[in-house]
Image (cartoon, rainbow, N blue to C red):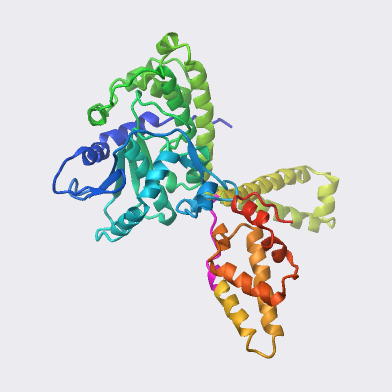
Amino acid sequence: MTQSKLFSSGIELASFVTSSSILCKSWTSISSNNEDIIWNDGIDVSWKVDEESSSDFTIVAFKATSSNVQADFVSSAELKEGNFLDFEFLCSKRIPIFSLNRTALSLFRDNHQELEKLKIEINSFTNLSTPLIFTGHGLGASIASLFVISLLQNVGSGKNRPLCITFGSPLVGDKRLQQAISCSSIWDSCFILVCHTKTHFQGSSLQIELNPDSILEILMALVSVHDKNEKLESVDYGNTVKTLYLKAECLGFSTQAENMTNKDSLATGIILQLRELGLTPHMQQQQKNIDINNLETKLKKLEEIFIHQKKISFYPSKKLNDVKVHMAQLEWFKMATKNQQIGYYDSYKNMNTPVDHEVVQFHNKLTVYWEKMVEEVQMKPQKEDSCFWAHVEEALLLCRELKIVEEKEETLNKLFEFEVYVYELLKDYEVSPDIFLAKSSYIRWWNEYKEIKGFSYTSALANFMNDDTKIKQYAIGAYDFP
């Protein structure tokens, strides 16, 4: 079987984005001093809703008065302890914890109440079909990113999803945050980062428009080109996006590709992208701290993994159809061995025919499929049973009912059924740790139920609920149920 060639479409995608007007209009919205559009002032942050800049977009622009960004991060576990849950929906069993930039998060929290009002304002727009673009520069870009991330929980597959276009943004989160967002093909298409080669970056990266791992490698390479003690001139992003718009046709790209002798189309595309960024063998001779050849090899490997993953997620129906074929072949094998009066078990055990050996391949492929299905489910953010809170309210009513009914056995049985139901949800991590908050309805039920059953009552749920350590481990996805 001839292996299909792999390609890198980075330059084509970049050309598509820069040849459109969205970068220019986003920057114009940030830098414009149009007195008809009022900036809303918060604590060291301001924002405006620009509906006049274009009939095609509604642009929400953010600015920050400070440019001083700390390099350290805050973990989601620390946020949960402080009862700040805006980003908790990103946690899953596979990614129970991630980190956010401390400076950006501090500004986001300081302005939280006003930003919540902004969300209400956005949801009240009469023309909901108008695309929403959120943008910002520097630290303001980080606030724009956090604001859009906080919207992702309610973003569906409809056309009107938010698009976040940021310029020279400090790094918003760590690799685990990137992984949490990338687990959704809808979410990871909501971000475009524009950064100049003279922009310094610290920490880890949040960049999700293309392959985030490849982008991180390129950013780190660009950082190493400059002396960290070098004083960088202020980047004129207005002029940058204008230049990109005028040169969007990428003149000379085809000629460069034709002159290259490398027959590997993926490697060729990567080399051309690096040249567009100024990362060339000539630079390697000048900069001892950068290995262009090693960077090309690493990027090629990362792109191959990324392309393979995208191919699998892009063709879910094909993947399912392949599984159906394998299942049909197993059913045929069972029927054939039954007609031979031996049965599938003994035929498989004896391995006397070529068909018996083929069955091993079908079985292995099905096993891999189901293992990957389980893995994908574990990667997705936690979702509660939609009826969970309704069942909690019913259980509270049952506790009250016990005080007035004479025949208590039936009510107690129903409460026990609810207890078993809750424990099964917990075992599968199907409920949010928020249910353990001191004032939640669930904790209110548990306290009433514990009083009914007596403090010496033991059960699987009671053993779990009476141990604060187990609850804390559950909150970070680290508790293994017996």
Residue 352 location (% of width, % of height): 84, 44
Residue 329 location (% of width, % of height): 68, 51
Q: Give the residue at x 83% y 44%.
A: 351
In this orientation, which residue lies closer to the viewer: 388 or 441? 441
In this view, the residue farthest toward the bottom is: 406
Residue 141 location (% of width, % of height): 34, 39
Magenta stretch holds residue 228: no
Instruction: Let me know if residue 58 appears in the view.
Output: no
88, above or below 138, in the image: below
Quarter the C terminus occupies:
bottom right
Residue 278 location (% of width, % of height): 37, 18
405, above or below 251, in the image: below
In this orientation, which residue lies closer to the viewer: 379 or 89? 89
Q: Quarter of the image holding residue 127?
A: bottom left
In this view, the residue farthest toward the left is: 35
The mark total stands at 0
Q: Give the residue at x 41% y 44%.
A: 106
Instruction: Let me know if residue 93 appears in the view.
Output: yes
Quarter the N terminus occupies:
top right
Magenta stretch holds residue 388: yes
Please name the predominant secondary structure of the magenta segment in the image. loop
In this orientation, which residue lies closer to the viewer: 4 or 355? 4
First to last magenta residue range:
380-390
In this view, the residue farthest toward the top is: 285
User: Does 394 sit left or right of 463 as displayed?
Assistant: left
Q: Give the residue at x 60% y 72%.
A: 445
User: Does 138 sit left or right of 180 as displayed?
Assistant: left
332, above or below 183, in the image: below
